[in-house]
Amino acid sequence: MLRFDDLQLFVRAADLGSLSAAARGMDMSAAVASAALKRIEQQLGARLLARSTRSLRLTAEGEGFLEYARAALSNLDEGRRLLARGQDQVSGVLQLSAPSDFGRNLLLPWLGEFQREHPKLTVRLLLGDRIADLFRQPVDIALRYGEPEDSSLVALPIAPQNRRVLCAAPGYLARHGEPRHLEQLAQHNCLLYMLGSRVHDHWSFHDGKREVSLTVSGDRFSDDADVVRLWAVAGAGIAYKSWLDVAADVLAGRLKVLMPELLCERAPLNLLCAHRAQLSKPVKLLREMLVSRCTLLTSQFPGFSEIDH
């Protein structure tokens, strides 16, 4: 197979009428240039340049081949420019996975705006609370709460200050009373999330002096975190949810944060990928947008700024 730099050398030598001048222009020694020309002639099975100690001229075969060599180099340059333009554009397919409630209620409308800004981008969105296998599934990136268990993954922070909050609908609190102390949670219906066969019924807090953990119970379990949010909005009980997932409900008055003085569990949101090579321009722009939107939401819960600084 003909080498790109060998073709370049041949064309430059033909244009300049000198192999040594072509070598200097390509920053190579005369010996390397001579070997390159010999290599291309051997691969083609034809003499391209007639050389003497003082002059260089194209052979008949060289004149015929020169046109094709120029065209090949021109096509390669155009291909490079095309790739460079493509790298500057936000296009192609973006495949991502996200948690169910964050994906449906926040990411979905944000992605709509993102695609309107970048109409050449195609998005494939997988929603679910199980961690996607980024090495096997057709996913470029995944958004997940918590610290990644797989240390081989690249993890970029989206909302490092995000935390869980205790919340319930005003209607539920009107019927059952509002708990003022953690011990009173035992008297309430707690809405539980389960991942696989594990039920997350062990809730942890910090009251400013000590770590407090307790086991709660309730009459509803779901492996879809968004269902737990919907139950809470419907007044079925108390939920322990990521602030990002319930911020819109709290700000709209559909849910109320309980015991806001408590320091609840961290729920940092990260962008995960298998390799840094997957951090394409669309992924980087998406991350910038997500960081901006999530920072705005976390800033609307006053406790976060006081807790984390």
Image (spheres, rainbow, N blue to C red):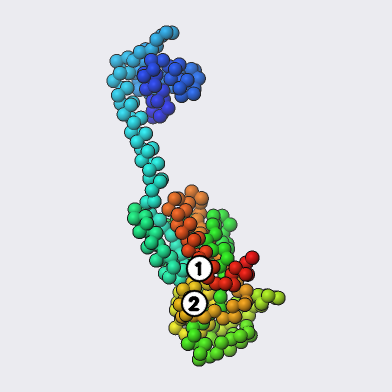
The amino acid type found where label 1 is placed reads Leu
Q: Are marks 2 and 1 in contact (CB under 8 Å)?
A: no
Image quadrant containing the C terminus = bottom right
Rendered residue at 51%/58% (across/down): 272
Q: Secondary structure at mark 1?
A: helix
Q: Which residue is mark 1?
A: 297
Q: Is residue 156 visible?
A: yes
From this view, report whether residue 205 is shown above or below residue 91: below
The amino acid type found where label 2 is placed reads Val
Q: Position of residue 240 (x, y in %)?
A: 54, 77
Q: Secondary structure at mark 2?
A: helix
> Mark 2 or mark 1: which comes first in sequence?
2
Q: Position of residue 225 (x, y in %)?
A: 48, 74
Q: Is residue 42 left or right of residue 308?
A: left
Specify the label residue 250 is tagged with.
2
Specify the label residue 206 is tagged with.
none
Q: How many marks?
A: 2
Image quadrant containing the N terminus = top left
Q: Position of residue 78 (x, y in %)?
A: 34, 36
Rendered residue at 58%/65% (across/down): 161
From this view, report whether residue 265 is shown above or below residue 77: below
